[in-house]
Image (cartoon, rainbow, N blue to C red):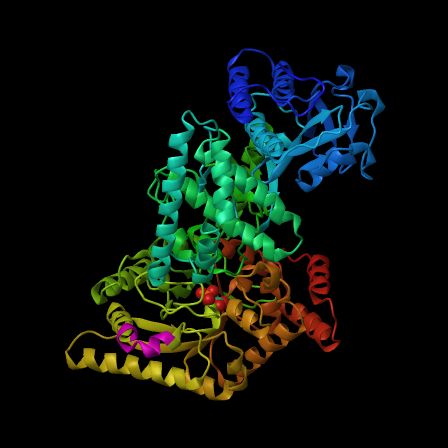
Amino acid sequence: MHNKRGDDKRVISSEPTLRIIMRGLRDIMSESGDAQSRLNKIVHQIAGVMVTEVCSIYLKRKDGSLELFATQGLNPDSVHKTRMKRGEGLVGRAAEFNITVNESEASQHPAFSYRPETGEAPYHSLLAVPIQRSGQSLGVLVVQNHAARVYSEEDVEVLESTAMVVAENLVSGLVAGGGPDLEISDSLSGVVKGESISDGIALGHVVLHEPRIVVHKLMADDPVAELERLETAITELRRSLDELLAHDHLSGAGEHRDVLDAYRMFAHDSGWERRLREAVQGGLTADAAVERVLNVTRSRMLRQGDPFWHERQRDFDDLSDRLLRTLAGRGIDGGRSEELPPDTILVARTMGPAELLDYDRHKLRGLVIEDGSGQSHVAVVAKALGIAGVGQAIGIVDRVSSGDAVIVDAEAGQVHLRPSQDVVAAYSDKVRFRARRQKRYGALRDQPARTKDGQDIALHINAGLLVDMPHLQESGADGVGLFRTELLFMLSQTFPRPKQQRNAYRAVLKQAQGKPVVFRALDIGGDKALPYIRQVKEDNPAIGWRGIRMSLDREGMFRSQARAFLQAASGDDLYVMIPMVSDVSEIDRAREFLEKEHDFLTRHGLGTPKSVHIGAMIEVPSLLFALDELLEKVEFVSIGSNDLMQFLFAADRTNARVASRYDSLSMVPLRVLKTLVDATNKHKVPLTLCGEMAGRPLEAMVLIALGFRSLSMAPASVGPIKEMIISLDAADAAQEINTMMSQGRTNLRQAITDYAKAMGVVI
Ligand code: PEP
Ligand code: MG
């Protein structure tokens, strides 16, 4: 029945070609046989049904080259011998650019590469489609004909869908068995590079923050019913998007209107719907059709070098995911309610601090996100929870499935996917090594943080949750230099009542056992949102209605917190710190509210603190020009270097592309810090720095050299910072760094690092 000449006469059957191929593949997969014999049967089957003289499978090696793995029609001796360099020939182009190549006169194409050993000379036409999974190209599926056949759109559709099924089978290891050099083995194991956002090493299992649906059933049993499923799901998807848009203020964190608008635009795209319908009519399940159309669209979008299209592709990925979820009858908002494994590694494209706090933190070991920088609040929360975090792990969401074993190495800023036993063993050693180092830090616990030349440095911890408080005693720190009260608010489903707040702050003070705790007034806004506070969408939330700006406008909210602080610290010393101060008058107003609450408590004979200290966070550069006035009005100041750097350089701390672009150890920040040391010395106002800078040994060394005598940091940093201090001669470092600054040296970080190394400072 097959026309071996390749004229356009098909199998005489009313059944769609794709369905016949799929049935054949299913039979092949259910039969016994080794990987190679299966691949051989697959190419034989495809060639037969598509009426082509040749059908071949090339698999991609990690170096980008392609190897012929199976063929029907070419010289069988060339299997595993014929190799093409990355991008070589038409087949190489299909793999390299993830594109379909359709040529009726292939040899006349300028990119054609002739391989005599395969005996392909007589074949004129060629259709090559990438074998891809989740956008990653694993190889190429090729058919060829003697005749100058013009492959129809249907041929292309059939071969692309077949390639998708082959990809699925390759990855599940059923067909080729892999081999360490093949790209598909990366689908099994591999390393994703990113950057550390929270130190630590964690071995565990993936929980996808927004689990992707993995399509396993590709062939439809009943195409008519399948089409109905598809249509119902599309209608449901459109309805849910309209609903989300109508209630935008209620939608989950990070769900912004413009993203939703883009989703809606895609969801109503008639071309998309048509392609989905066609794929189902060709024999795929509705779910497989979504995946197939996604693959094709993804490669088209990724081919455009423009980042705009990459973003759109991400929207489109998410939209497809929503449709898959709808088809699977699951809700569209993640699996937080799912049972978490005890060694959960959360993997997400993006995540806000409140979302991270939604998870049971006793089960969290690690966090991996595709965006995020070390200064973002989700990183701050990850550090507070003591979980290892890697950001900028581009593409990871597409490369893992829930339940996969992974290792998060935040020391090296990388993630090992489905690691081999050797890698696991090496990391188990590394974890043991870190435990020994922790022990060493533990031994320093009771030793004073005193430099070699006798300067005492007060070390405080940053905290925000009750679970952080035991770290205070464990680390031997002098107190809590920053208690981020908003984290308590983020954990709550509703605005905490005054009594709840008072009890929480009281519990914090109790656990501090007499060591000072600096409570920071609510710093909501920016990348920290409370689900129960209705916030207007802002174009620039980091410089929007946040921190003290919101507190002063919501007098009731601020005063209830002020009263809770005063009551909690009854009979003790109370330290309250005001975030995001931009103008000195904001301190006056905050003090006024605190005084009113103090008066109220006194009038009613309720207890008040022994002393009240009000401090300002210096994180907005305008204060640098009002230091004399500010320092007259406060009892202490603390530099929020995370925000100060972002505002000083106008570089969004949550945007990794710019967050690390400007160095905090360069001339301008060092001058600013020096100015602050001098001004606070002049006014005799205690100065601390509580941004992430304080927890990095090299940065902390510079701060001490500039004159800082108090630092506040994540609990895990206390050990390393103390070790650095003990090895430091502060006066010598001060002299050296002042000289470097006065000489206007450009690469200060390098010069400072060289100095530390030469002097044996433990950085
Ligand atoms: C800072 O900005 O440096 C700071 C400590 O506050 P947060 O990180 O909470 O904004
Ligand atoms: Mg801040």
User: Residue at image x 82%, y 24%?
Assistant: 121
> Along the line of sight, which residue is nearer the eye, 374 or 55?
55
Residue at 76% of width from left, 37% of height from top? Answer: 86
Magenta stretch bounds: 550-558
Residue 62 picture quarter: top right
**Rendered view: 691 above or below 238:** below
In the displayed structure, does residue 677 sit left or right of residue 62? left
The residue lying at 43 percent from left, 38 percent from top is 343
Looking at the magenta stretch, what is its main secondary structure? Answer: helix
* Vertical arrangement, residue 249 with respect to residue 85, above or below: below
Residue 700 image-quadrant placement: bottom right
- The number of numbered discs placed on residues in the rendered structure image is 0
| 6 is within the stretch colored magenta | no
Q: Where is residue 10 in the image (x, y as percent from the top left)?
A: 61, 22
- Residue 50: horizontal and vertical position, in percent? 63, 23
Look at the picture and state if 79 lies above or below 503.
above
Q: Please state the horizontal and vertical placement of residue 160, each as a whole percent of the image.
A: 60, 33
Left or right side of 115 for 543: left
Residue 675, position in %: x, y?
Answer: 59, 80
Magenta run includes residue 554: yes
Q: Which quarter of the rendered picture does the N terminus lie within?
A: top right
